[in-house]
Amino acid sequence: MSRNGAGVPAGTKKVLLLTPRGFCAGVVRAIDVVQIALELYGAPIYVRREIVHNRHVVDDLRARGAIFVEELSEAPEGARVIFSAHGVSPAVRVEARQRGLHVIDATCPLVTKVHLEAVRFARLGFSIVLIGHKDHDEVVGTLGEAPDSTVLVSNLGEVDQLTVPDPSRVVYLTQTTLSLDETRDIVARLKERFPAIQAPPAQDICYATENRQVAVKAVAPRADVLLVVGSRNSSNSRRLVEVCAGIGVPAYLLDDCGEVRPEWLEGVSTVAVTAGASAPENLVQELIEALQEQGFAELEEVQVKDEDVRFSLPPELARREPALTNIAAPL
């Protein structure tokens, strides 16, 4: 019997498939940017860092002719280079110009929004508190927009140790892929310490991150365990595991169905399944098939929110492919 009393008949094993899940509009756009660039210009196309944080996506694009590099110095002068969805600092853009690289910018528009906020508030003389995870590619890029005005905090302890030149001119910004709950606690502490602190004009945590966390909170209590498809370097995927654990349901992150451990399913009658915003849907379907082979025969798709978000291609490609300027994110 299911420990959560979800009403599953005796002997029946069930999968709850969460919607929304998987690719967000920014990830669809970034992957399409690489694919279209390869079609238009041919291999090799260089990509600075992982285009999105998913091992399978990166391996597939590498097989098509993309060459992933950590730094621009690894690409030949004059090469065509794509910036990843996580964005880059101004210093990287300067380096690209100096080396004569032909840049296609696949930065997610929601990340660009945070960059523009950082620039604007720095020009207005504000101290910027950036809430995020140290060394994450997105955070590195945002910090680079206004390094002299920005300080990074990752937890409540760092907030308590924070000092700013003028407590009356402080603003906070956030990484787009954070936990809503954790960020809420940090913001509350910032407001306690700096009552005049300003919020960004609109929430920085992206719609897809929020929607997937909301779905986990709504559905996971009906399950014995949650399986999250996503790579370990995917911030939004890790947050889904943390959100689920926070409501008392065991959760595990896996790149694909081959990583499912038998002990995760011992005594389990209901499994919830979701995927991070950079995880391909085919990996979810392969996991469902693997679970069905292990007796989880009943499948219920639970739709918590609708998503219909579209982002335009970057201008470097939109000029070449006008018919492809609007890209929709599939569920």
Image (cartoon, helix red, strand yellow):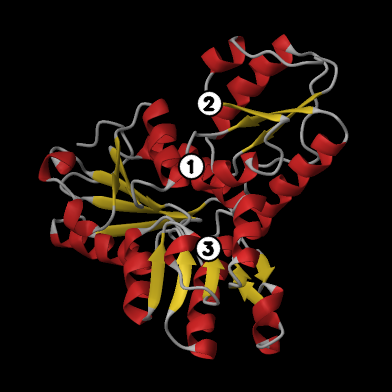
- CB atoms at circles 1 and 2 under 8 Å apart? no
Helix, strand or loop under label 3: helix
| Amino acid at circle 1 | His
Q: In front: 268, or 126? A: 126
Q: Where does label 2 land, which residue?
A: 154
**Badge 2 or badge 3: first in the primary sequence:** 3
Q: Residue at x 46, y 88 (%)?
A: 42
Judge from the rendering whether residue 79 lies leftward or rightward of residue 146; answer left or right: left
Residue 325 placement (x, y as % from top left): 68, 79
Q: Crowding near pointer 1: few (<14 within 10 Å), some, many (20+)?
A: some
Residue 229, visible in the rendered structure? yes
Check the picture and name the quadrant holding the N terminus: top left
Helix, strand or loop under label 1: loop
Marks 1/3: CA–CA distance = 16 Å
Q: In front: 191, or 249? A: 191
Q: Crowding near pointer 2: few (<14 within 10 Å), some, many (20+)?
A: some
| Amino acid at circle 2 | Ser
Q: From what the image shows, is residue 100 above or below residue 216?
A: below
Q: Residue at x 59, y 20 (%)?
A: 185
Q: Nearer the viewer, mark 2 or mark 3?
A: 2
Residue 92 placement (x, y as % from top left): 59, 55
Residue 11 placement (x, y as % from top left): 15, 47
The residue lying furthest to the right in this view is 124
Residue 136: image tag: 1
Q: Residue at x 69, y 44 (%)?
A: 145
Residue 27: image tag: 3
**Badge 1 or badge 2: first in the primary sequence:** 1
**Badge 1 or badge 3: first in the primary sequence:** 3
Residue 238: image tag: none
The quadrant in which residue 105 appears is: bottom right
Q: Nearer the viewer, mark 1 or mark 3?
A: 1
